[in-house]
Image: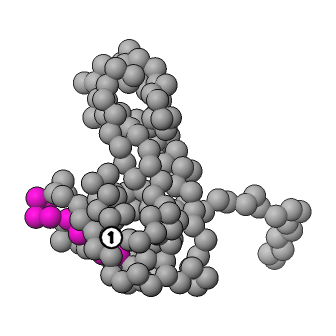
Amino acid sequence: MAKSLTVLHEPPHRDRHIPLKRVRVFKDVECRILSRKPFGYWSHWYRGLSHPCYETDCACATPLSKLPRELHFVLHVKCYETNQDFFLEITDTCTRQLLDQVPDKTNLRGLRVVFTRSKGGDKGRLRCRVDGIAQFDQDLPAEANPRKTLDVIWSKKGPLDPNTRKG
């Protein structure tokens, strides 16, 4: 005889994890931007891994503070081909190109954009083309902050220990 399941309380709320994607060669991303403006952050490249540096001025511990920083941007977008929303990482050059094509640089929300990668492989130049200026702000899902997703990605890499040697 099977017993019925008695639940005394609701399970804890689980925060939605929005994936971070990059444009791959020959896999254009046609999407509508959900972010009002790009989220910019700095990172250091150390021992084959990137490490976050969110502050305007580097406040990282040594040896990261001695290394150069690279600027990245993230947009919250919705791809209508797959009906999914995700964070799209774009380069600073692509961000400048995007902002040069729009009349209102403070509100990108609702713009339809095609992101492409040049023939140089997954490290090729990232480009974008705005497809019209139509904005439908009221019909879009709310924009999300990518900081939580970035923290989840970097926490999987483990803490930085400068005393360990890479084998």
Q: Picture quarter containing residue 113?
A: bottom left
| Residue 40 located left or right of residue 92 | right
Residue 94 pos. (x, y %)? 29, 59
Say if 66 sits above or below 42 in the image: above
Mark yes or no: residue 11 visible.
yes
Give the residue at the far right of this rendering. Answer: 8
Q: Disc 1 on helix, strand or loop?
A: loop
Q: Is residue 15 above or below residue 153?
A: below
Foreground of the two, 134 or 23: 134
Which residue is labeled 1 in the image?
101
Is 69 part of what is drawn in magenta? Answer: no
How many numbered marks are there? 1
Range of the magenta residues? 113-121
| Amino acid at the residue labelled 1 | Gln
Q: Residue 129: x percent and y percent?
A: 28, 74
**Direction top: furthest residue:** 163
Other residues around mark 1 within 10 Å, as few (<14) / some (14–19) / many (≥20): some
Question: Quick one: quadrant of the C terminus?
Answer: top left
Which quadrant does the N terminus fall into? bottom right
Left-right relation of 48 to 40: left
Residue at left 48%, top 35%? 56
Q: In which quadrant of the rendered view does residue 115 lie?
A: bottom left
Q: Residue at x 50, y 35 (%)?
A: 55
Q: How far from the left and from the top, in percent, is residue 50?
A: 35, 38
Please determine whether, in this image, residue 90 is positioned above or below residue 49. below
Q: How is the image coloured?
A: one colour
Rendered residue at 40%/53% (across/down): 73
| Residue shown at 20% from the left, 65% from the top | 117
> Which residue lies most toward the left here?
119
